[in-house]
């Protein structure tokens, strides 16, 4: 079964770690891919508010690495 939700992804940057809220897509419960579209949009203001709610919920879940380390979990003590 394919599903998706919003998650926070961590990326290495020249200034440390950079975080993004993205859609993460799952196959059989395992993160398999993520979007690279940073826009929040919809057909109504309610759609945008719904997305903002989902991003807020994503902040309560473990952070995943983006890029080459996806979908490993980001752990702050591992960076730096």
Image (cartoon, grey):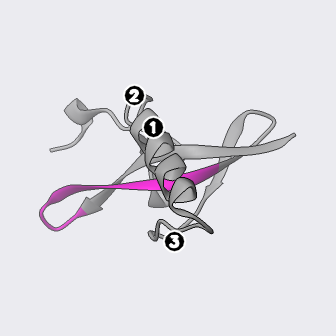
Segment colored magenta: 13-24
Q: Of marks 3 and 2, which one's residue comes earlier in the chain?
A: 3
Instruction: Mark 3 and mark 1 in contact? Answer it, CB < 8 Å.
Output: no
Q: CA distance from mark 3 to mark 1?
A: 16 Å
Quarter containing the N terminus: top right
Q: Residue drawn at (12%, 63%), measured in percent from left and top?
A: 15
Mark 1 surroundings within 10 Å by alpha-carbon count, few (fewer than 14), some (14 through 19), many (20 or more): some
**Residue placed under numbered mark 1 in the picture:** 58
Mark 2 surroundings within 10 Å by alpha-carbon count, few (fewer than 14), some (14 through 19), many (20 or more): few
Q: Secondary structure at mark 1?
A: helix
Q: Of marks 3 and 1, which one's residue comes earlier in the chain?
A: 3
Q: CA distance from mark 1 to mark 2?
A: 5 Å
**Residue placed under numbered mark 3 in the picture:** 37
Magenta-colored stretch includes residue 22: yes
> Is residue 62 toward the left or the right of residue 2 in the image?
left
Q: Residue drawn at (74%, 33%), measured in percent from left and top?
A: 29
In the foreground, 79 or 51: 51
Magenta highlight: main SS: strand
Q: CA distance from mark 3 to mark 2?
A: 21 Å
In the foreground, 77 or 27: 27
Indicate the position of residue 41 as horizontal and vertical percent values.
52, 68
**Residue placed under numbered mark 2 in the picture:** 60
Instruction: Mark 1 and mark 2 in contact? Answer it, CB < 8 Å.
Output: yes
Indicate the position of residue 77 as horizontal and vertical percent values.
21, 31
In the foreground, 45 or 5: 45
């Amino acid at each position: 079964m394919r599903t998706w939700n919003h998650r926070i992804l961590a990326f290495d940057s020249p200034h440390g770690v950079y975080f993004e809220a993205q859609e993460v897509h799952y196959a059989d419960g395992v993160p398999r891919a993520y979007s690279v579209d940073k826009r929040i949009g919809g057909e109504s203001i309610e759609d945008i508010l719904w997305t903002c709610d989902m991003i807020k919920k994503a902040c309560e879940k473990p952070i995943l690495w983006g890029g080459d380390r996806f979908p490993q979990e980001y752990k702050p003590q591992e960076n730096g």
